Image: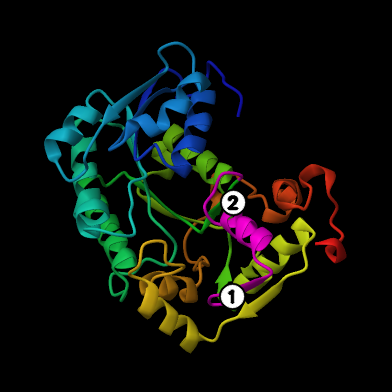
Amino acid sequence: MSQSSTDSLSGKIITVLGGSGFLGKHLAQELLSRGARLRIASRNPQRAFAIRPLGALGQVQFARVDVTKPASLANALAGSDAVVNLVGAFTGDLDAVQGSGAGRVATAAKAAGAAALVHISALGVRADSGVSYARTKAAGEELIRVAFPGATIMRPSIMFGPDDHFVMMFGDLIARMPILPVFAPQAKLQPVFVDDVAEAIGRALADPLTHGNRTYELAGPEVVTMLELNERIAAAEGRSRSLIALPDAVSGALAALTGWLPGAPITSDQLKLLKAGSLPSGDLPGFADLGISPRPLELFLDRWMIQFRKHGRFGTKDVSAA
C-alpha cells in the first residue's frame, strides 16, 4: 500500500510486540507505507534492525520488552496509539508468553491509552485442546477480550512468504534429498500469504470502530494437503523426488522417539497440530469482511523455487534432469 497523508494511521505511534519475527518484518512494511511511526518491541530487537531503512528518518524505533513482566510492558507501550501483539512460542512456558502473557499485553495497552489492539492468534485454537500451544492461545484470546473489549483477534492459517520457515524449508529439503518422508500427508491446509495478513492487520488498526471486538479467520484461497504441497514444490523446482507418505503410526513413533532432540524433524505436539489441519471454521468473518482478496501460493511458487533448481535461474523445470 502506498503512503497517503490522509491515511488514518499517518503519524500514529504503533507498537508491534514480537515484531522482530517473520510476520513482524512484513507488517512493518505495511504500516510504514501508511505513514505510521513504528516501535518494534522484542526480547531481541536487534534482530529487526534491518527494518530501519524502510522508514523515514525517525519513523522507526526499537524497544526491549518481556511480556511476562508488567513493568517492561508499561515502558514499551507508553504513548502508543495502537498495539499489535505478535508474541507466540512453541516451547517453554507457553502460558506465560501467549496465555497470561497476552492478558498482560491487553492490560498494559489499555493502561497506555491505546485506541486499538490487534492480537495474532492461530486457526484451530481451543480451550480443551490436548496441545499446550493451542490451549494457551485460546486462553490468551479470552484474557484479551476481558482486558481490552475492543481488541481485534486474528487467527491466520500457516503463513507463507519468500522468507518463511515453511514453504522455503521444504524447498531446501526437496532440493537436497532424493527421498523425503511426508508427515501427516493427508492433513489439509489453507496457507495464507504473509503480506495479506499484514494488510489485514493494517486495515483493522485503521478502523477499530468497525473491526474492534471481532475475531477474524485468515486463510488463503485454496486447500492443499501436505503431500500435494510437497509435490507442487518439487514440480516448481523441476526435480523428480520420491515423497514417502508416512502412516500415522510411523509418524507418531518418530515424533515420540526423536521430538525431544535439538533439530528434530517434528515433535509430538507439532504432529498433532499438523494432523488437525489448518482450515477456517467458516463461522467467523474473514478476508472478504476486510475487503481483501487473498493471493494463492501458486502465484509465487515458481518464482520462489528458482533458487532451488539445478543451476538456479539458468536451470529448467525438466524433472528428468534433476
Q: Secondary structure at mark 2?
A: helix
Residue visible at 65% across and 60% down in the picture: 176
Q: Position of residue 16 (x, y in %)?
A: 36, 35
Residue 171 highlighted magenta (yes or no): yes
Q: Secondary structure at mark 1?
A: strand
Residue visible at 17% across and 46% down in the picture: 68
Q: Amino acid at mark 2?
A: Ala
Horizontally, is 153 left or right of 104 in the view?
A: right
- Between 33 and 54, the one lying in front of the other is 54
Quadrant (top left/top right/bottom left/bottom right) for the C terminus: bottom right
Badge 2: residue crowd in 10 Å (few <14, some 14–19, many ≥20): few
- Between 214 and 67, the one lying in front of the other is 67
Residue 152 highlighted magenta (yes or no): no
Residue 181: numbered disc: 1
Asked if residue 285 shows in the view, the reply is yes
Q: Position of residue 46 (x, y in %)?
A: 36, 30
> What residue would you read off at disc 2?
288
Quadrant (top left/top right/bottom left/bottom right) for the N terminus: top right
Q: Position of residue 170 (x, y in %)?
A: 60, 60
Residue visible at 45% across and 11% down in the picture: 57
Q: What's the magenta region?
A: 162-185
Q: Is residue 174 above or below residue 243?
A: above
Of callouts 1 and 2, which one flags the residue occurring earlier in the amino acid sequence?
1
Horizontally, is 237 left or right of 267 in the view?
A: right
